[in-house]
Image (cartoon, rainbow, N blue to C red):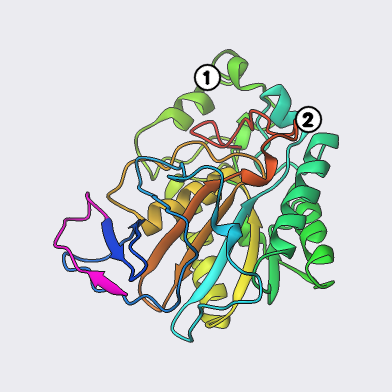
Amino acid sequence: MSVVRTQCGLADGLLSLRFSAGFKIAVCVKFPETINTLVHCYLPKQIFALTRQSTQLANPSHSLSMLDSNSSCMDGSYADIVVVRHGETEWNADGRIQGHLDVELNEAGKQQAVLVADRLSKEPKISAVYSSDLKRALVTAETIAARCGGLEVITDPDLRERNLGDLQGIVFREASKLSPKAHKAFLSCRTDQDIPGGGESLDRLFQRCTSSLQRIGKKHKGERVVVVSHGGVIRSLYQRACPNGKSGGKVLNTSVNIFHLSDEEWTIKSWGDVSHLQQTGYLKSGFGGDKTSG
């Protein structure tokens, strides 16, 4: 196995890894100008590609879940954090803004939680499960924890969705009429813009959720953990890992997004993987996983 080290700017973000078996992968990374990445384990003979511009696997019939569940490519320098968006709610299906309001999973969301839990139970061992304290995330996390060895879910309010103030409870397409000031603030390009009614700015959301994930990463170096959260939070985590990259796109319900966290660097290893929902009828629209997040 050899590592082909390339010089590229942050906008490129590609590292080509060539293995003795004759295949190679392209990985989205987030490092300074010179990329110097060591590969710690041998990968199976599938070809994967991940860039900030695409969330599709080069070979769609396989995903990172195909790795041998008994194998480990972890070392003590980073934490392997599997970030999952909660299952679908009725408000997701209706296009209604949730924010901090405590909305429960609908039947589709419960089935999505079972499917992602079953998937993660077949992958490398999970050491801990963290979650937002809002029901839609917590129930998803509890379903995963029960399937992955009966772990206890650790809740953290810093993993909550963005507080959207006066927009909460409103159908998004009606927001401009029902709450024009809050709607205007929501669409503002300013990241320090708070939303009327006690809502948060994007800066405040970014600070609390990235700090939470960093704390988790420091506590679980050399381990694999699951974090269940919300669309707006996961988009902020993506921005922390790829600050100069394009948008990560829509974050679907129960999508799997894998981060490697060391003391200083965040790397995205997999993004937007919903292979566990394919062919099931539970791959829903997932309102709220993009700029309408809530």
Find residue 155 and report its image quarter: bottom right
Q: The residue tagged with tag 2: helix, strand or loop?
A: helix
* Residue drawn where x is 58% and y is 65% of the image: 67
Q: Residue furthest left?
A: 7
Q: Position of residue 7 (x, y in %)?
A: 14, 62
Which numbered disc, 1 or 2, marks the residue closer to the eye?
2
Q: Earlier in the sequence, mark 1 or mark 2?
A: 2
Disc ID at residue 258: none
| Magenta run includes residue 177 | no
Neighbourhood count class around disc 2 (C-alpha, 10 Å): few under 14, some 14–19, many 20 upward:
some
Work out whether 51 lies above or below 262: above
Q: Quadrant of the N terminus?
A: bottom left
Neighbourhood count class around disc 1 (C-alpha, 10 Å): few under 14, some 14–19, many 20 upward:
some
Over which residues does the magenta segment extend? 1-13
Viewer-proximal residue among 78 and 201: 78
Find residue 125 and report its image quarter: bottom right
Residue at label 1? Answer: 180
Q: Position of residue 83 (x, y in %)?
A: 59, 58
Disc ID at residue 90: 2
Residue 163 seen in render: yes
Horizontally, is 75 left or right of 197 in the view?
Answer: left
Q: Quadrant of the C terminus?
A: top right
Does the magenta stretch mainly form a helix, a strand or a loop?
Answer: loop
Viewer-proximal residue among 209 and 150: 150
Viewer-proximal residue among 159 and 127: 127
Viewer-proximal residue among 206 and 219: 219
Q: Tell me how far mark 1 sits from mark 2, CA to CA.
A: 24 Å
Residue 104 seen in render: no
Work out whether 116 lies above or below 74: above
Amino acid under disc 1? Pro
Q: Position of residue 90 (x, y in %)?
A: 78, 30
Amino acid under disc 2? Glu
